[in-house]
Image (tube, grey):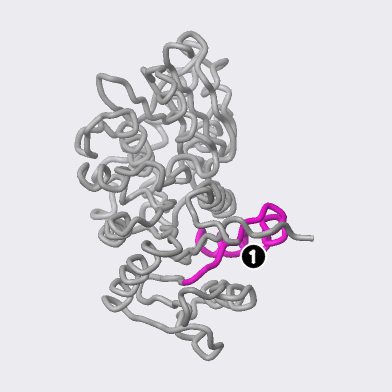
């Protein structure tokens, strides 16, 4: 028998790609668990890059589970949200109309039941909506890193009420990196340094190189396993790691921007997207990197070290790139696509707090987003 409903969390989801669809499936599959905990999540709207599907009645129970399942199937098949209109229960808004409806919904529910605006997109375009939602008193949950890595003023605005924002999944999928850092800081223990391998793709690539494999072969294997973006240069550029590093640096109080981070790309500009296609890069560009990477791997090995692609955040600055590290360190022992983060502070000075586990994947990231949503439940109106 389900427990009495204590907390109702109305949700509007921005982005129904891989992470967004997995989140909706998690919400549906966890209904019995949440019912036993006295919690109900009501999905009132879902937006993709061009439109917003929203419930007819914002104060209703939201979309039923059958509609959510059909929505996931439709988006997986590449169909537009408009294909679901015949199901009833909902209205469709396009382009600027959709943005206005999100803000109107935030305004209405922010003053009554409350609202969780969840950003699982991969764009900077949601920043304005998120800031408006904050102004309306809504909660915000992010898997999308970009709103937290644009102008510092935008970051400051979004985190101005820290009780109403969660963004654990922006750094390590569902690993408790953000929560650990904030708890240490809140205890009065100043964090002096964070070192992390925060790319499952690059973690896999670097650990495979220890076996004497060629860089080009390892990257192609990673692509075939689905670890890389369609264009592996999106991973090899280091920019995704740099965004995660920037979020952590800002969390430590550093008022910096991407321009302040020293990022080492694993390919030169002459092999970049402006110079050659993805196909040409995979066929003839990657192999040009084999010799230089092999030399660095061997140089590290002669010293008893291994190469890892890491971010290093200290009071003196923030760096992202290849580092030689002892084989027996937490980062040196890293294998496969796991993430590892070492947090140093007064209490964790000689032996850092180490967090390790799966740090990538739609399923894992969506689970982290759901946990963030549930973490906000105490802020919502209790029902009788």
How many callouts does the rendering have? Answer: 1
Q: Which is more toward the observer, 114 or 96?
A: 114
Q: Can you give x and y, in whole percent of width and height, for residue 25 in the image? A: 61, 64
Q: Can you give x and y, in whole percent of width and height, for residue 335 in the image? A: 59, 31
- The part of the image, by quadrant, that contains residue 330 is top right
Q: Can you give x and y, in whole percent of width and height, for residue 160 in the image? A: 29, 43
Count neighbours of disc 1 (C-alpha within 10 A) and say few if under 14, some if 14 to 19, many if 20 or more: some
Q: Is mark 1 on a helix, strand or loop?
A: helix
The N terminus, quarter of image: bottom right
Q: Left of 47 or right of it: where is 160?
A: left
Q: Which is more toward the observer, 233 or 81?
A: 81
Classified by dominant secondary structure, the portion drawn in magenta counts as: helix
For the question of whether residue 276 can be seen, the reply is no
Q: Left of 304 or right of it: where is 246?
A: left
- In the rendered image, residue 185 lying in the magenta stretch gets the answer no
Residue under pointer 1? 28
The C terminus, quarter of image: bottom right
Looking at this rendering, what residue extends furthest in the right direction?
1
Q: Which is more toward the observer, 237 or 193?
A: 193
Identified at 44% across, 77% down, the residue is 54
Classify 40 as above or below 184.
Answer: below
Identified at 59% across, 78% down, the residue is 67
Q: Left of 244 or right of it: where is 362?
A: right
Q: Can you give x and y, in whole percent of width and height, for residue 286 in the image? A: 40, 45
Classify 162 as above or below 120.
Answer: above
Identified at 42% across, 36% down, the residue is 290
Q: Left of 138 or right of it: where is 347?
A: right
Identified at 49% across, 21% down, the residue is 306
Looking at this rendering, what residue extends furthest in the top direction?
350
For the question of whether residue 23 can be seen, the reply is yes
| Range drawn in magenta | 19-44
């Amino acid at each position: 028998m389900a427990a009495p409903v204590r907390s109702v969390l109305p949700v509007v989801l921005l982005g129904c790609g891989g992470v967004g669809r997995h989140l909706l499936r998690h919400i549906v599959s966890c209904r019995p668990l949440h019912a036993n905990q006295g919690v109900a999540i009501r999905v009132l709207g879902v937006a993709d890059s061009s439109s917003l599907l929203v419930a007819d009645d914002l104060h209703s129970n939201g979309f039923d589970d059958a509609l959510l399942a059909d929505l996931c199937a439709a988006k997986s098949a590449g169909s537009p949200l408009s294909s679901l209109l015949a199901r009833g229960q909902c209205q469709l808004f396009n382009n600027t109309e959709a943005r206005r409806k999100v803000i109107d919904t935030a305004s209405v529910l922010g003053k009554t039941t409350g609202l969780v605006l969840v950003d699982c997109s991969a764009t900077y375009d949601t920043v304005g909506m998120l800031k408006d939602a904050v102004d309306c008193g809504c909660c915000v949950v992010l898997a999308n890193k970009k709103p937290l890595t644009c102008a510092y003023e935008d970051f400051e605005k979004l985190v101005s009420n820290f009780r109403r924002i969660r963004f654990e999944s922006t750094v390590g999928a569902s690993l408790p990196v953000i929560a650990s850092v904030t708890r240490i800081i809140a205890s009065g223990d100043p964090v002096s340094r964070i070192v992390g391998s925060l790319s499952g793709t690059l973690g896999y690539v670097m650990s495979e190189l220890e076996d004497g494999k060629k860089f080009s072969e390892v990257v192609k294997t990673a692509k075939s396993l689905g670890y890389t973006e369609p264009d592996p240069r999106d991973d090899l550029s280091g920019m995704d790691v740099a965004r995660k590093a920037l979020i952590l640096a800002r969390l430590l109080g550093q008022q910096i921007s991407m321009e302040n981070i020293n990022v080492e790309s694993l390919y030169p500009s002459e092999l970049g997207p402006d110079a050659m296609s993805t196909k040409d890069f995979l066929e003839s560009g990657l192999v040009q990197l084999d010799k230089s990477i092999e030399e660095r791997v061997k140089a590290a090995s002669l010293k008893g070290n291994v190469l890892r692609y890491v971010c290093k955040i200290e009071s003196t600055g923030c760096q992202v790139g290849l580092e030689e590290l002892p084989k027996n360190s937490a980062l040196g022992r890293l294998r496969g696509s796991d993430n590892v983060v070492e947090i140093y502070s007064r209490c964790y000075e000689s032996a850092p707090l180490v967090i390790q586990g799966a740090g990538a994947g739609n399923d894992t990231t969506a689970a982290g987003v759901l946990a963030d949503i549930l973490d906000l439940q105490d802020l919502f109106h209790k029902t009788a």
